[in-house]
Image: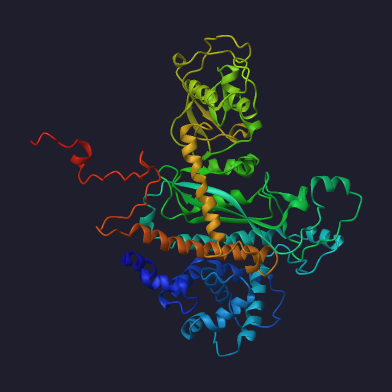
Amino acid sequence: MDDALREVFELGQTELDAAMTIKGNMPNALFGRFLRVIDSSGALERLDEWRTADAAGSAGRKAQLSYRTVLMAFLLNSYWGLGYSYQELARTITHRLSAEQAERLGFDRSQGDVDDWYHRAWRTMQRVLGHIDPWHQTGHLGTRLTGAENEKARNKYDLDREHRAHELSALLVRASVEMLPKKYLSEYRGDVALDSTFMRVLGFNNPNDYSKKALKERAHLPKRDMLNGDYQCGWYTRKGDHDGSENVSKSIPGYEADTTVLIDTKDGAFAFPLITGLSFHRPGEIKNGPRGTIEQHAAFTDKRGLVVVDRAFNGLRPHQFQETVRHHRFETVYDYKSNELGNQGSVPGKPIIIVDGVPYVNRMPENYIMISRWHAQGKENPATGVPFTEAERDAIHEARAPYRLKAKGRIGADGYQRFDYPNPRSYFAFDPVTGRATQDNPTGSVTIGLDEQVIKQLQKYPWKSKEWRARYGQRNQVEMSNRLLKDHRTENLGDPKARTGRGFAYNYLAAIMATVSSNIRRIIVGITKLHTTDANGEPKKRARKRRDSTGQRLTHAATPTSTNEAVMPPDDTGE
């Protein structure tokens, strides 16, 4: 195990544990590995380019700390769980770095005390944030804007600076993922889970001026004053798409981060659940972020498996998400609202309908098509006089399987996919118009393209099938990943008191550094787990959850030691 860790970090387990526990005095080898992530990312070069593009002239105080220094200190504070405040940033620069490490970063610690370095770090960080701040033309963070000021701020929003923020995120996150040696990705199948996680900010909720109801009722009235010093944040609720602007009194101020995480939907958790994509936005405003995270993930690996998401994402318009997913040749695993079940659309010009996420030949009786919606909405079964049961629904799901089209190969680079029609002899066909028996049944193969009503809900497995349940259940891995990212024992991104700055750019940068730090931590944990052995030198295995009739945990099946032993049963004849 120590050899495997030293291959990546130049330190063994004991040294890495000490470096994680002690908030400072990081070994130079590990310090250099962290610094290499920043140096190799391309982020520093882009920041320099943006500085040149944004410069109004040569006036202004010369920076005494480099971008490289403040990013590195921010990253170390995240790894040590010290939060993202400017006070802790200054303390790390002043006290937690060695003289040699300070020299590597290009500054002399003796040239000032912690207060001096606080102001220097603050000024440099403001320059960094300014390059990626879409609200830079307004400023005024920490001041409650009047309604008129807030309206002007929204009109001055700089979309180019937002794109810069997403680019900076992609560069740094990609560099952290590439720290993992490629040999550890040999077992990765290409599956990825995507989810959003909320980051609360301190302060009051802002007025509900931007809900659909408020925009209509107050169109002729001035905007109300903002109540939160961070006027750039939004309103969060757990319900629906998480947009709390319709009921601000029961919502929470903050932002949302979208993350994509490496998972394994077949055998359970992947040893390295790294975050490969990150985006940032107001709660509920997920029009572009998910597409960006999928593109970041696709740029990292050429392996194509399943994209597993909750209902918020397949509820997007196809050009915002589904088209990108299919162009990158991923298949999907979706969940649906009750009113989205049943007939979800048809393939133009073809006798094909999408039912519960997959294509069927349009020759099924109505109850085969609508059973999932009827069950979800509690519709009464005419045969029994009571609502359809789950067992009745599942029986009909099984009975309609012969009508299902079968995928023929993988999705193409254009997002199109070939399917074979089912054998007409395997099902009893009904005319979709008259409901009567018919012999007019299609055969051969067909291509399904990117028609919006088709790909919006199209997925690999039928909803609630055995295969679907097994894959969709693995979505909890991205939820666990987000909880780990926000845990106070690790990067502590979830504590608003640990993020004392304000605004989109500051909170986004905190999320970026937390993600980079968490990926480094996950690589260490993954390598450690893979190379941890028991007293007999065998890899340690987690205890099984299933128990026998006496309540004892079942043991793992023995691993065959040879091919013959794996194929042939033991010879109990004594010969």
Left or right: where does residue 186 sit relative to residue 159? left
Q: Residue at x 64, y 81 (%)?
A: 118
Which quadrant: the C terminus? top left
Residue at the front extreme?
Answer: 550
Query: In the image, residue 126 lies at what x, y percent?
Result: 67, 73
Query: In the image, residue 277 lies at what x, y percent?
Result: 54, 55
Query: In the image, residue 245 lies at what x, y percent?
Result: 76, 50
- Which of the two residues, 84 or 428, is positioned nearer the viewer here? 84
Q: Please determine whether, in this image, residue 288 is positioned above or below residue 144.
A: above
Q: Is residue 483 visible?
A: yes
How many numbered dots are placed on residues in this image?
0
Q: Please determine whether, in this image, residue 434 is positioned above or below residue 547.
A: above
- Which of the two residues, 232 or 487, is positioned nearer the viewer here? 487
Left or right: where does residue 535 sit relative to residue 17? left
Q: Residue at x 37, y 61 (%)?
A: 528
Q: Please determine whether, in this image, residue 453 is positioned above or below residue 492.
A: above
Q: Residue at x 69, y 65 (%)?
A: 133
How is the structure coloured here? rainbow
Q: Please determine whether, in this image, residue 192 is positioned above or below residue 574.
A: below
Residue at the left extreme?
Answer: 575
Q: Is residue 330 visible?
A: no
Left or right: where does residue 57 sit relative to residue 392? right
Which quadrant: the N terminus? bottom left
Query: In the image, residue 279 lies at what x, y percent?
Result: 60, 56
Quadrant position of residue 357 = top right
Residue at the right extreme?
Answer: 220
